[in-house]
Image (spheres, helix red, strand yellow):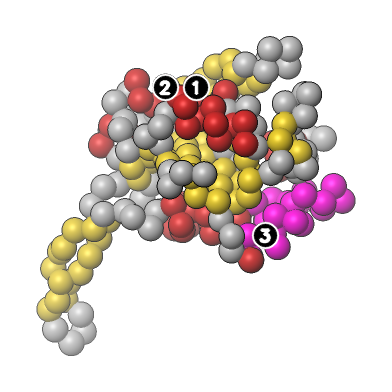
Amino acid sequence: MDNMVNIMSHPLITHKLSIMRDKNTSVKDFRECAHEVALLIGYEATKDLKLEDYDVETPIRKTVGKRIERQVALVPILRAGLGMVDAIMDLIPASKIGHIGLYRNEETLEPVEYYCKLPTDISERQVLVLDPMLATGGSAVAAINFIKNRGAKNIKFVCIIAAPEGIKTLREAHPDVEIFCGALDESLNENGYIVPGLGDAGDRLFGTL
């Protein structure tokens, strides 16, 4: 892997991901673990946010504080990406939120767009694209295409698990986009699902199995 692909090795992420993989895990527990894993990955994905100085007056004296210079936009890929938004909002409450709706054609495995609504100032923000699964990479590539067409240049992709095929596809299409991932799995199966994976993240998050 190159230095634009960050695979997390934190024991808390590994522990919580194992709970998410278990087919017997309840919707409640799956959702809570997804939130916690997204929070941990989001912490890592925002470690290089640039800061600017500003004046602060403490109870003791005046000093120089630091605040985030470039504001953040979160763009979940619907619908599963919604399960990661609240976690990143816990870290950066001032983030603006866009939404991109894509579904996968089950025959061609290609993404089909049905919705795209992004902040008007997205070109000025650090953009975090959120999707629990990076499988074929088609949805991630399409979503980032839409975002770049709106002028955004600072984009990162944040996922919970990925397949090598998805990493390869995304890196080839958007070599400037850094990837943050909770775990890299073995491969895709003939139906385009990640193996061993955790099933359909959207269905497990929203109880629509």
Disc with the residue nearer the chain's start (1 vs 3):
3
- Residue 32 falls left or right of residue 190: left
Q: Which residue is mark 3?
A: 14
Depth check, front residue: 130 or 194: 194
Q: Determine whether label 1 and label 2 are within 8 Å by CB.
A: yes
Is residue 158 in the magenta section?
no
Can the viewer see residue 85 in this picture?
no
x and y percentages locating residue 130 in the rendered image: 52, 40
- Disc 1, SS: helix
The percent position of residue 201, horizontal first and vertical second, equals 70, 39
N-terminal of the two: label 2 or label 3?
Answer: 3
Q: Label 2: which residue?
A: 146
In this view, the residue in front, 186 or 34, is 186
Indicate left or right for 101 with 2 as reference.
right
Q: Residue at x 85, y 47 (%)?
A: 23
Q: Measure the C-alpha gap from mark 1 to mark 2.
A: 6 Å
The residue carrying pointer 1 sits among few (fewer than 14), some (14 to 19) or many (20 or more) residues within 10 Å by Cα, namely some
Q: Main secondary structure of the magenta part?
A: helix
- Amino acid residing under circle 1: Ala
Q: Which residues are magenta?
A: 12-34
Q: Amino acid at mark 2?
A: Phe
Q: CA distance from mark 2 to mark 3?
A: 32 Å
- In this orientation, does residue 13 appear? yes
Farthest bottom residue in view? 60
Q: Is residue 67 above or below residue 62?
A: above
Whether 121 is drawn above or below 27: the answer is above
Quarter location, residue 128: top left
| Residue at disc 2, secondary structure | helix
